Amino acid sequence: MGGLLKEIYKSRTLYLFISPFYILFLVFSVFPIFFSIYLSFHKWDGIGKMTSVGFNNFTYMFHDPNFWQALINNVAIWLLANGPMLVCALIIAYVINLSIVKFKGFFRIAFFLPNITAMVAVVIIFQSMFGNEYGLVNFLLVKLGLGQVAWFNSSTGVRVIIALMIAWRYLGYNAIIYLSGLQRIPKDLYEAANLDGATMFQSFTKITLPMLRSIILFTVMMSTIGGFQIFTEPQVLAGNQSPYPGSETIVLYMFREGFVYQNYGYAASVSWVLFVIIGFISVLNWKIFNKSDD
Amino acid sequence: MKIKSLTNALLAILVILAVTACGQNSNNASSSGNGNDNAANGKVKLKMWYWNGAISDSTIEAAKAKFPNIDLQAEKLPSGADFLTKLKTTITGGGSGPDIVTMDSWISTMLSYNDKFVNLYDQGARDIQSEYLDWKWKMGTTPDDKYLIALPIDVAPVVLYYRSDLFKEAGVASTPEEFKNQVKTWDDYFNLLKTVNEKTGSQTATIVDIFRSLLGQSSEAYFDQDGKYIGDQAHIKSAWDSAVQAYQAGLTFPYSSDSEKNAAMNNGKISSFSGASWAVGDVIAAAPDTKGKWNIAYPPGGVGNQGGSFMGILKSTKYPKEAYEVIKFLVSPENLMVGYKDFGNYPSTPEIYAKPEMVNKNEFFGNQDLSTVFADAAKDVKVAHTDTRDDMVLNELTKALGTVDAQKRDSEKAWKDAQEQINRQLSRQ
């Protein structure tokens, strides 16, 4: 320890140069993280006195049906959005990568564009498109001779809309990642397979998929983490009050408890439970993908 | 050598930062209202936080001109929850916050922390109390009326917006006078709506909107003065039942978003709704095709208030006296009139309601003078006791009531479930 301090003292100039980052990092990241642990065992309205409540925040959470409902909504939206989206992204990447496709650059940009649009604007457009009474989607359904669907009246409808928004947004992003993975696969593997008379489907399942495993793991992990942090879509869609059924996600639940109801301590404990959930699922992902390696 | 001098420069910067930080701390610690020490460099510096549309920019310019010895730094911040969070952080964390702050209806949550604000009664606010609407003034005082944390800016009485052409077509009350005299209760209103609905096929706002409007007119909300929960009692239940009744009679239009509401208004599907005074601009923007067909009237069942802001002084200021002079000027009746002209914020000073400058005739509303209706309503506003847990209760209730329409749930069951959930939340340690 003393040796380390001495080392630091010796190269103090260099440490001084990198210190702005560390000071900001300490103040704005490390301190809040530890403070939120402390906060999660307290009751605090943001201004008044903090009172220690032990594990009450956690016991209350596990008995609160709203929390479980938010968790269910969250998992449902995550599955609805990410399963089909990742499959489609892979197919799109595969198609763009085919040698017969021209204008690869154009497609890459076109598919990536949704990722950089302003989220709030996107949500408002989706909201109008799926409107119960005057939505474009319902208009088309009626024109096609089908009935109107009251999208925002059922939790399934609302989850589908939120999932669609997420899928639309991240489809291109994941496709680009897959595409770069595909381009790293040596061409001779496909040529050899071709000589052996493999069909396109066979070379996709026997060469492309195994070679892409690490990339697929990465995208699944990233969308898991993102999936449990869904916030903007339901927040803008439903506003602070009277959310549509099925729209409340864990982060929205946490936000409402903290910044609307002023239960900052409770919100901190929700955030730590969320942390554990994401950590657990990430480890699970890791294990599953590594196992099938051998 | 080069590196060494750079190091020295960096060190010097760090030292300066540290010193200024300490300096600010000590300033705050000794900020007990003695501002004379700073008078040496001429101007008294006052920082003010407000949001767009809270107070007119031309008024702020006028204040700068009127107080040449005050350096008024008005900072425009994003409104809503962001503003509240920022204010709370500043109050909790200390530091060089603003001297003057604007506050919204959430001022009630600040009353329990009145010691963070300058008591404006000590600055002579009693002298101007009579100029303001009493109910609005009381929203800024502690229950014992000994401590005033802010002066009123504007009010937002909720009135009835309606399509006079549709009501005329249905052969029922259609002028603002007829409304005021004949449509006194919500039952009268619903009966009218039934006829209008049969004759023209138009409806009113959603089941949840009706519930909110009804609650807004009540002099009791969800908690009594002692913080006891009363949100399961008759005054809330009857509002709930009325809303359900309107829905069951087919009077509500179930739009799923604001853009749908706008479309419905423009298509003539909505014949009337309760809206605050600031909704004038919204209707004009939402329903351009119905220009000239709208009117406003004194609302059935009493008057609620939806919004309107305040202006107070933080205790950490060094110049409470000067700050008070500034806010007194900013919220003076003449300046509030400027705000009304600029963005339709209805003043909280009744003495000017009758002035000719206040006349606000709008083609969109068939040249009706909107001010007379607002003036009439503003005097009769009822305000309920508020509590920090109101949001939670209202959210649970409206969520449950929404499912009565959206998912055809039984209203009694929805009510029971919502109360259970609220009680669970309230039992929290």
Image (cartoon, rainbow, N blue to C red):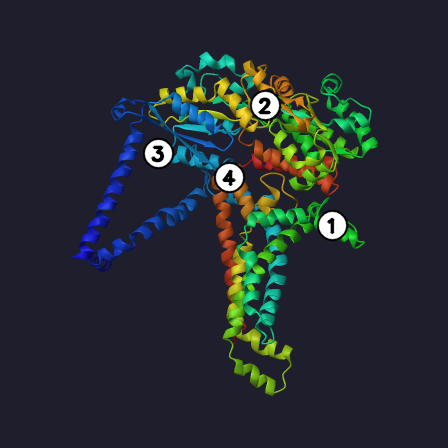
Q: In this figure, which residue is indicated by the disc labeled 1?
A: A138
- Single out the mark in the foreground, 3 or 4: 3
Give the class, few, some or many, for how many residues have Cα within 10 Å of label 2's Cα (few <14, many ≥20): many
Mark 3 or mark 2: name the one nearer the start of the chain.
Answer: 3
Q: Pinpoint the chain carrying mark 3.
A: B
Compare residues B356 and B173 and report the one nearer the observer: B356
Q: In this figure, which residue is indicated by the disc labeled 4?
A: A259
Dot 3 amino acid type: Ser
> Furthest residue to the left?
B1
Give the class, few, some or many, for how many residues have Cα within 10 Å of label 4's Cα (few <14, many ≥20): some
Q: Which mark is residue A251?
A: none
Give the class, few, some or many, for how many residues have Cα within 10 Å of label 1's Cα (few <14, many ≥20): many
- Give the distance between the C-alpha atoms of the residues marked 1 and 4, in whole angstroms: 35 Å
Q: Pinpoint the chain carrying mark 4.
A: A
Which quarter of the figure is the N terminus of chain A placed in?
A: bottom left
Q: Is residue A66 above or below residue A111?
A: above
Name the spot of residue B328 as percent of width and height, x first: 44, 19
